[in-house]
Structures are given as structure tokens and as C-alpha cells.
């Protein structure tokens, strides 16, 4: 009886590591979900601008964020330019747009592209409203598939 118990205990001890190894092999490799990197704000002005890069695998989304600096801000249309580059490749064509900016701020644009693992992606986001002081925000991020 003691011998049977010892054999069953040894078999159970061997089975646990095998199950653990199997579960570890089934775990996904690399980052899960999107990684967002936003840069420092652009020059002070009517809006606080930030350029952001969102990476999921080798899919990259560039966008900007604009938040009014004045608490008495009245919603209005504002012009912006968003541009990007995968370092070592041709620049990504810039996108110019005009969007309504409310007191709470707004996410602007969205350029989606792919980049090889390990590549550095840069983005710039600028206010291009006539008569306003320039404000450009930039950011760089590595595509860490």
C-alpha cells in the first residue's frame, strides 16, 4: 500500500510540470493589445497639442490630441496637420484636416500604416490655423512586435 501511494505521488509530481510547460507554450508571444506613446506638448498657445503613436503588433496608428488651454474655450473649427515617418522608409503623406474642438479636447486624425518589428516611427502634429501661433508636437516610438 505504501509502495502504491509512493508511485501515485511520484506520478502526480511529474504530471504537474508537464501541464505547466504545456500552458506556458500556449501563452501568446509579444505584447498583448495596443501600446500608446504620446510625446511632450507642443509650444504653448490656444491649444495643448500632443502627437501619439499607437502600436499593435506591426500595425501603427498616428494621431494627435488637442486640448484647449483656456477654461472659457468656445467650441470652434481648428485646422491641423498630422505627418509621420517610419525611419529608413519614405515619409508618410501628411494629412491636413479641420475639426471641431470642444472644451474637453479632441483626438485628431489617424494615419494607419505597417512597420517592421524594431523600426522607429515618428509623428508630428501641428496646429495649422491661420493667424494662430504655430504649435508642433512630435513623438517617436519603436515597433516592438
Image (cartoon, rainbow, N blue to C red):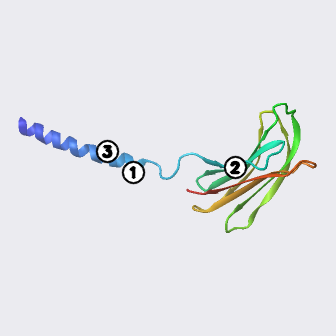
Query: Percent from the top left, x then y, of residue 111?
Result: 74, 53
In front of the other: 92 or 3:
92
Distance between the Cα atoms at labels 1 and 3?
A: 10 Å
The percent position of residue 40, horizontal first and vertical second, equals 70, 49
User: Which residue was labeled with disc 3?
Assistant: 19
The crowd level at tag 1 (other Cα within 10 Å; few <14, some 14-19, many 20+) is few
Residue at 72%, 56% in the rendered image? 123
Q: Residue furthest right?
A: 131
Numbered disc total = 3
Whichever of labels 1 and 3 marks the residue nearer the N terminus, that label is 3
For label 2, the residue is: 40
Look at 69% across and 67% down and name the residue there: 89
Q: Secondary structure at mark 1?
A: helix
- Marks 1 and 2, Cα distance to the nearest angstrom? 39 Å
How crowded is the residue under tag 2: few (<14 C-alpha within 10 Å), some, or many (20+)? some
**3D distance between C-alphas at marks 2 and 3:** 46 Å
- x%, y% of residue 110? 75, 49
Picture residue at 57% right of the left edge, 62% below the top: 118
Nearer the N terminus, badge 1 or badge 2? 1
Left or right of 37? Residue 129 is right
* Mark 2: secondary structure: loop
Vertical relation: 115 (above or below) 62: below
- Specify which label sits upstream in the sequence, 2 or 3: 3
Category of crowding for the residue at label 3, using alpha-carbon neighbours closer than 10 angstroms: few (below 14), some (14–19), many (at least 20) = few
* Residue that badge 1 annotates: 25
Q: Position of residue 78 (x, y in %)?
A: 87, 43
Amino acid at each position: 500500500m505504501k509502495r502504491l501511494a509512493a508511485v501515485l505521488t511520484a506520478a502526480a509530481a511529474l504530471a504537474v510540470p508537464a501541464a505547466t510547460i504545456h500552458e506556458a507554450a500556449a501563452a501568446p508571444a509579444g505584447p498583448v493589445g495596443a501600446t500608446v506613446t504620446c510625446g511632450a506638448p507642443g509650444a504653448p498657445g490656444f491649444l495643448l497639442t500632443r502627437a501619439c503613436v499607437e502600436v499593435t503588433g506591426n500595425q501603427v496608428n498616428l494621431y494627435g490630441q488637442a486640448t484647449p488651454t483656456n477654461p472659457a474655450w468656445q467650441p470652434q473649427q481648428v485646422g491641423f496637420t498630422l505627418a509621420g515617418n517610419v525611419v529608413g522608409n519614405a515619409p508618410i503623406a501628411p494629412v491636413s484636416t479641420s475639426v471641431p474642438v470642444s472644451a474637453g479636447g479632441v483626438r485628431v486624425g489617424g494615419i494607419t500604416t505597417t512597420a517592421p518589428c524594431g523600426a522607429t516611427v515618428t509623428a508630428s502634429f501641428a496646429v495649422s490655423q491661420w493667424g494662430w501661433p504655430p504649435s508642433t508636437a512630435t513623438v517617436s516610438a519603436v515597433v516592438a512586435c
